[in-house]
């Protein structure tokens, strides 16, 4: 299979994987909020969210991760790590992304068993984790530079801290 076809499949996998991860965490926010609703609304919504989470996980998020990792591994055979330090940094960013993926699966199973341990606000923050990784991965891969990847992560982190502070002040003002 030609290089550009493999790379195209890799990009398609990445887009689908991130879409699944972002939507999964958003479903968790809605699921946690539905847990507070009165019956029968609560039971109806929780059952619907469990179904949506299961379908998203098995039909999109998991297959997309497999496609991304498989095509990424194939592309790695074309670029020796010893000659491409940016790839090592990119892999260092992909490792926590894979861990996040499996943690999402663990959360999904807990929610399926009605063991909600996070609030909707905590899930909102949780949903931002892959954003940092996406920014770092994209800037590193496009620039093929470790320093650009680090600067993009730092900028994203600074923005997140500022946004969190502003959000907390806004929420405190509502009390």
Image (cartoon, rainbow, N blue to C red):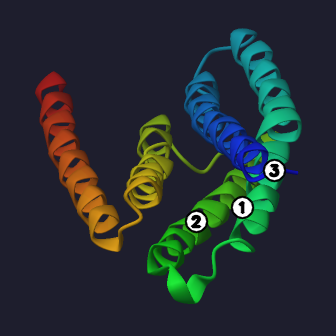
- Residue at point 55% right, 89% down? 82
Mark 2 to mark 3 CA distance (whole Å): 24 Å
Do we see residue 109 in this rendering?
no
- Residue at point 28% right, 56% down? 152
- The quadrant where residue 72 appears: bottom right
| Callouts 3 and 1 close, C-beta under 8 Å | no
Q: In this rendering, would 13 be left or right of 99?
A: right
| Residue 99 coordinates in the image, percent (x, y) | 64, 66
Per the image, label 1 sits on a secondary structure element best described as helix
- The disc at residue 131 is none
Q: In this rendering, would 23 be left or right of 157?
A: right
Q: In this rendering, would 169 be left or right of 1?
A: left
Do we see residue 159 in this rendering?
yes
Mark 2 to mark 1 CA distance (whole Å): 11 Å
Mark 3 to mark 1 CA distance (whole Å): 14 Å
> Which one is closest to the eye, mark 3 or mark 1?
3
- The quadrant where residue 71 appears: bottom right
| Callouts 2 and 1 close, C-beta under 8 Å | yes
Per the image, label 2 sits on a secondary structure element best described as helix
Crowd tier of the residue under label 3, counting other residues whose Cα lies within 10 Å: few below 14, some 14–19, many 20 or above:
few
**Label 3: which residue?**
2
Q: Is 142 drawn above or below residue 27 in the view shown? A: below
- The disc at residue 72 is 1
| Residue 58 coordinates in the image, percent (x, y) | 88, 40
| Residue 19 coordinates in the image, percent (x, y) | 63, 33
């Amino acid at each position: 299979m030609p290089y550009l076809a493999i790379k195209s499949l890799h990009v398609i996998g990445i887009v689908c994987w991130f879409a699944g991860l972002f939507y999964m965490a958003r479903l968790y926010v809605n699921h946690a909020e539905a847990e507070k609703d009165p019956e029968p609304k609560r039971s109806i919504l929780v059952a619907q969210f469990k179904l949506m989470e299961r379908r998203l996980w098995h039909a999109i998020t998991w297959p997309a991760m497999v496609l991304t990792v498989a095509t990424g591994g194939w592309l790695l055979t074309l670029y020796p790590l010893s000659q491409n330090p940016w790839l090592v940094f990119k892999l260092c960013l992909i490792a926590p992304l894979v861990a996040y993926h499996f943690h999402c699966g663990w959360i999904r199973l807990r929610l399926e068993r009605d063991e909600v341990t996070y609030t909707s606000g905590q899930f909102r923050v949780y949903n931002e984790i892959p954003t940092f990784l996406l920014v770092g991965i994209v800037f590193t891969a496009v620039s093929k530079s470790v320093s650009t990847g680090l600067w993009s992560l730092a900028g994203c982190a600074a923005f997140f801290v500022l946004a969190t502070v502003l959000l907390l002040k806004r929420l405190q003002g509502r009390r």
